[in-house]
Image (tube, grey):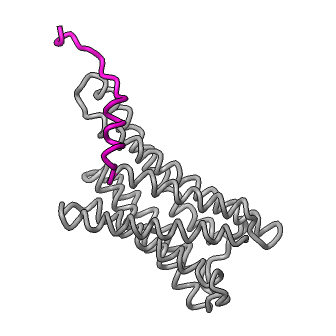
Amino acid sequence: MEYNAYITAIFASAFYLLASFRLIRLTLRTGKQPELYLGLYFALSGFYYIGVNLPDIAGLGPWSTAGGVALEWVYVSGVVPYLLFIRSAFRPDSFWADVAVGVCSVFLLVGTIGGTRNGPVEYSLENPWFLAQWVGYTAPCVWIVGEAMGLWRSANKRARIGLCPPIVANRYLLLTLFGCFQVLACAADLCWANDIDASETVSTASDLLLGVAEIASVGTLWLAFFPPAFYIEWIVRRAVILPTPMDG
């Protein structure tokens, strides 16, 4: 991988950690669980990506086997609060949502336990443990796209007749984009695995795809939870509110 690709990964890591700090601080004010779960997911993901890339950038050499395995568990541990975020934000009283959280957790657990018997999980399309782990962390990303997109369509219709604030409808759109970028990042992991199967190294294109997808996903979520004043004004200004019969 090229030096610029490592820098992209570190930048994404810093963005994750900063977003996690803001979300957890927001939780202290609101006392709401979804922000806490998402903040924990971002924090653990940020530590994982820094841990994976910083030794190479600093020229410290690869992690020991135990260190690499520990990093695997840091990331997997972060996916669980991500699942809890989706359930608590979109389906807090749904039995099937509880089942989905459980099934994804099982895939994560089985894939990580099986894949780390001799070191970090090996990226390979022929490695069933990697594929099981991949399903465990990709399914939540697909899930949030479906949930947020449905709410965005409904909120957008209501916003057009003045029954929903435009910024709320836009927040659902941003959550949809966040999920799409996360799915793209998961697809980049498959590109990694394919590269390693073919040449035992990761191409610069695959690595940059992952870094850009991660940065874009956090950026869209940042706008959803912490939109700057100029962005809110822009969304409100460009909103199209149709007249209703009650307007005369």
Q: Position of residue 179 (x, y in %)?
A: 47, 50
The residue shown at (73%, 70%) is 2
Query: For this rendering, which residue is in front, 135 or 201?
Result: 201
Q: Position of residue 53 (x, y in %)?
A: 60, 77
Q: Position of residue 211 (x, y in %)?
A: 59, 62
The image shows residue 63, relative to residue 44, as above or below, that is: below
Question: What is the residue that sits farthest to the front in this orientation?
Answer: 230
Q: Is residue 139 left or right of residue 151?
A: right
Quarter of the picture holding the N terminus: bottom right
Q: Is residue 76 left or right of residue 120?
A: left
The residue shown at (29%, 29%) is 159
Query: For this rendering, which residue is in front, 125 or 182?
Result: 182
Question: What is the residue that sits farthest to the right in this orientation?
Answer: 199
**Which quadrant holds residue 115?**
bottom right
Query: For this rendering, which residue is in front, 85 or 50?
Result: 50
Q: Position of residue 201 (x, y in %)?
A: 77, 72
Residue 152 magenta: no
The residue shown at (71%, 69%) is 124
Magenta segment boundaries in residue numbering: 225-248
Query: For this rendering, which residue is in front, 136 or 166?
Result: 166
The image shows residue 243, relative to residue 180, as above or below, that is: above
The residue shown at (60%, 66%) is 8
Residue 227 magenta: yes
**Which quadrant holds residue 85?**
bottom left
Total numbered badges shown on the rendered structure: 0
Quarter of the picture holding the C terminus: top left
The image shows residue 75, relative to residue 147, as above or below, that is: below
